Image (tube, helix red, strand yellow):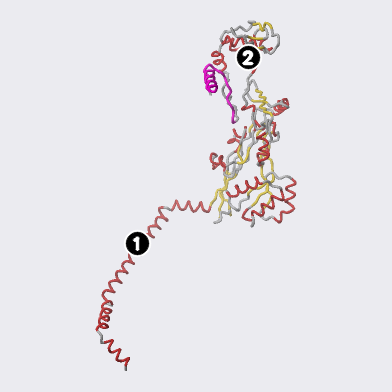
Amino acid sequence: MLVGGLLRYAFNSKAVISIMSRLYTLKDNSVENQVFVNRIIAAFLIVVLLTIGLVVRLVYLQIVGHEHYATLAKENSVKIQPLVPTRGMIYDRNGKVLAENTQSFSLELIPEQISDLDGTLMQLQQLLNIPNEKIEQFQKQRKRQKRFISTPLLLSMTDEEIAKFAVVRPYFPGVDIQSRLVRHYPYTDLAAHVVGYVSRINEAEMKTLPLSEYRGSSHVGKLGIESFYETELHGKTGYAEMETNVQSRAINTFNTVPAVAGANLYLTLDIDLQKTAYDALEGYNGAVVALDVKTGGVLVFSSRPGFDPNPFVVGIDYDTYQTLQSSENQPLYNRALRGLYPPGSTMKPFVALAGLEYNAIGFEQKHYCPGFYQLPNVPHKYRDWKHGGHGAVNMSEAITESCDVYFYSLASVLGIDNMHRFLQQFGFGEKTGIDLVGEKTGLLPSREWKQQKKIKIGIQVKR
């Protein structure tokens, strides 16, 4: 009874009637239909716009951009594998080999096939006594390559190293011994300064070398003939077009352009004469250069002490290099190319020619040599090498006996301007243009040079 009375009261109340009226108003069918239609139209327009965009894109991909994307797709499936050319040989004038390519065995790793690369490197280092420098070189090189490419760790393995690894080979998956061609210099220090050597390409050289020609190459000429004729010796890199899968692994080769081997060079150098000159310098630091007077070809180009260039090819260790660098004998310094020395008596025939050219003296005209020479009004005596002098000598005798006093007197008569002008015609004070890298220019004094030198000396004295 009580509940029924409450319900009747609630339904009869004005508040309930008002609420029900509002709910009825919100459920107006015409309003709901209009909202629904608007949403349908908006959705249709969006679908139409997306469809148009899709059609336009398909047209572009299939028609407008077909050639471009077809090329990209082909490049994704075709890789260019460089074929490294064989480096050219270097011979002396008689055909004796100065630089050759010898078969060598290297320890190489395929990172993809090694589960614990760091642990494997540590075991190999202990087994074969590999220096830390070579481990670092390997790490740098393998980071620039795909994981499935074989990367050398140890070059030019000795028979002992090969035997040690052969015993444990089954326990090192992904590690094997491969055969490679390595540059070798049979005459070691005898021809190092003229032939030079090749060594690994460093980061600075990678920025300057033509990428297309050195893709796949690991060595480049550093000094001497190896550096000057790098382009000719290196040859032309070939390539193989290889079909690859999505992991860039080669599955088929369908086009190959073979590499062109580097040119062989024949020098004017005579290695037997080179040895004679090198042996003659034993106990001394110096240089010997001998030319063919008919052709100007260099027969001897010797600098002592020399060095063995072969360790630079496979990677010289730090301690050995520091020993060469810090040696007081400076074996790495090319004295024949960069050493500046007083010309001594080798200048006398040229001064004699200048005397004849400017009529300063006759060929048969004699000059008395008392064993010293004095400039006018100067008490200082410039001594001759021969105590007591040579007596009266003509030009031929003065050159033969190397009479200092004769040429002191002739130089005084000629004067600095005539001597400088005449000697300059023979290339004194200029580079010879020899086909080696690093030649230094000599000095041919002149009046202007002397004035500049005096000014510099004066400034230094004032300080």
The amino acid at mark 1 is Leu
Q: Which residue is mark 2?
A: 349
Q: Secondary structure at mark 2?
A: helix
> Which range of residues does the magenta coloring cover?
437-462
Queried whether the magenta region covers residue 452, the answer comes back as yes
Residue 336, how many percent across, how many down? 64, 26
| Residue 309 at x, y percent in the picture | 67, 36
Crowdedness near tag 1: few (<14), some (14–19) or many (≥20) residues, C-alpha within 10 Å:
few
Residue at image coords 68%, 48% = 107
Q: Secondary structure at mark 1?
A: helix
Task: Pick out the residue farthest to the front.
Answer: 463
Residue for badge 1: 49
Residue 436 lies, with reference to residue 245, above or below; the image says: above
Sequence-wise first label, 1 or 2: 1
Q: In the picture, which quadrant includes the N terminus?
A: bottom left
Q: Position of residue 410 (x, y in %)?
A: 60, 10
Instruction: Pick the residue in front: 265 or 39.
Output: 39
At 48% from the left and 52% from the top, the residue drawn is: 72
| Spatial separation of the CA atoms under disc 1 and disc 2 | 96 Å
Q: Main secondary structure of the magenta part?
A: helix
